[in-house]
Image (cartoon, rainbow, N blue to C red):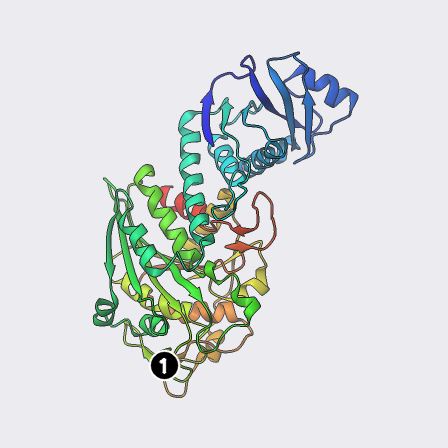
Amino acid sequence: MEIKVAQNVKNTPVEVLVINKFEGENTSEELANTYAVNKDHFEGKFGQTYLLHTLGKIPADKILIIGFGKKEEFDHNRMREAVAKSIKKLQQIKAKKAAFDFDVTLDYGKSAAIGAMIADYAYDKFKSEKAHHLDEITFARFSESEVKEGIVFGEAMKFTRDLANTPAQIATPAKLAEIAQNLEGIETKVFDKEEIERMGMGAYLAVGQGSVRPPKFIHMKYTGKNIKKRIAIIGKGICFDSGGLDIKPASSMLTMKDDMSGAACILGVMRALAELKPDMEVHGIIAACENMPSGSSYKPGDILTAKNGKTIEVDNTDAEGRLTLADALCYACELNVDEVIDIATLTGACVVALGTIASGIMGNDEDMIQRVINIAKESGETFWQLPMFKEYFESLKSDIADMKNTGSRNGGASAAGLFLQEFVKDTKWCHIDIAGTAYIEKPQKEFISGATGAGVRTLLNYINE
């Protein structure tokens, strides 16, 4: 779908003209007011739609009215959702081209473009019958720069969603490494198994040792012209999680291709930085591997030594993500960065606590946490801070090592956060748990089922602020 910008679209012949209606107000198109508002009493509640055939009375063949709800409640997030709702309606009527002419006073171009691209998404690569997509849409009244930035964000989300939806037979550790090495404007170094071993990443190596596919440790670097801050972003890169020897039930394994959603997010973000050009130094880090059962798998009761020398008793091989992140965090903290953020489909406990609506967030710096939460809200994502009371670490204590990799089911998301904190040294750090938000099994708001690209918008806005 091509997205264009024009100053005026009302006098241009178009298949569908999309306009808005606030509750208690008329639309900007008299024909719509006559039939939809006055005759059929279309109220314009948020998300409501009304399709009007113009019968040649104006240049557009049809008018689609989208309800914007109450004017005082309207914001960038509602614009994104309203545009997404409009796109889905246009798909239903098999439209190919449409023009959007919204009667608003602010420039919502970025949000509108993101909403359009979220709604136009479909993962149909392996289907004979493809989804219907619009060929072209045009936004009036918005600036070209805002729309272009929204397109960059939308492309990053699409890239991330495609990758997280890709079957594990294709999205292997080697494939993630290949993608990283081909990113424009990004320096990439990929470490193989022998190099990972020399770096002392015993926790990460243990997770991947049961798979026939070797691990790949990926370090990407973007360097802006006038560096104001140095930040490392880490994505959990478990390309498939069987649970290892503590194998998952079959039903729980069905969507485990998505256990690299954090890595997909980081790749999507790094891909966009070359176009956004923020004045930052950004390190993108992925410890990619598969967690598989075999004769060479790591076992419950094994003692692992992480990069910082701390020892870990394996209590459960299905608590593998935190082991890979432990070594990745050690590596990131050695890069002399100002901040570290990791993003991961880490715990089922976070899903139980927050469902599919919110991602959990924890960290060691309250100001940084609140900044991320606020930017997430502005970006259209919901992050909820979970506690890191030291008492949660009690369940991780081991009689024979510095800690266990898992403990009680109670407070499991917080315990996982405290585990990760053991590998963060003198650096501001946030941990984002997207276990419930990265992949949804039924449509939710503007998203269809499947991968959502969780975290992409927030991290890009955080880096680009």
**Residue 335 in view:** no
Q: Would residue 39 appear left or right of 135 to someone viewing this image?
A: right
Q: Residue furthest bottom?
A: 399
Residue 432 image offset from top left, x and y in percent: 45, 58
Please tell me which residue lies in front, 215 or 127. 127
Q: Residue 461 appears in which quarter of the rendering?
A: top left
Q: Nearer the viewer, residue 128 or 375?
A: 128
Question: Is 25 positioned to the left or the right of 287 in the image?
Answer: right
Instruction: Provide residue 57's location: percent of width, then percent of height.
Output: 66, 11
Q: Give x and y (percent) for residue 18.
A: 60, 25
- At 50% from the left and 22% from the top, the residue drawn is 141
Above or below 372: residue 209: below
Q: Is residue 177 above or below residue 380?
A: below
Is the residue 252 above or below the residue 109 in the image? below
From this viewpoint, is residue 246 visible? Answer: yes
Q: Secondary structure at mark 1?
A: loop
- Vertical position of residue 329 compared to residue 124: above or below: below
Front residue (pair 178, 198): 178
Q: Position of residue 224 (x, y in %)?
A: 25, 42
Q: What is the crowding at mark 1: few (fewer than 14 residues within 10 Å), some, or many (at least 20)?
A: some
Judge by depth and name the residue closer to the eye, 426 or 32: 32
Position of the C terminus, as image quadrant, is top left
Q: Which residue is mark 1?
A: 402
On the picture, is 250 further left or further right than 310? right
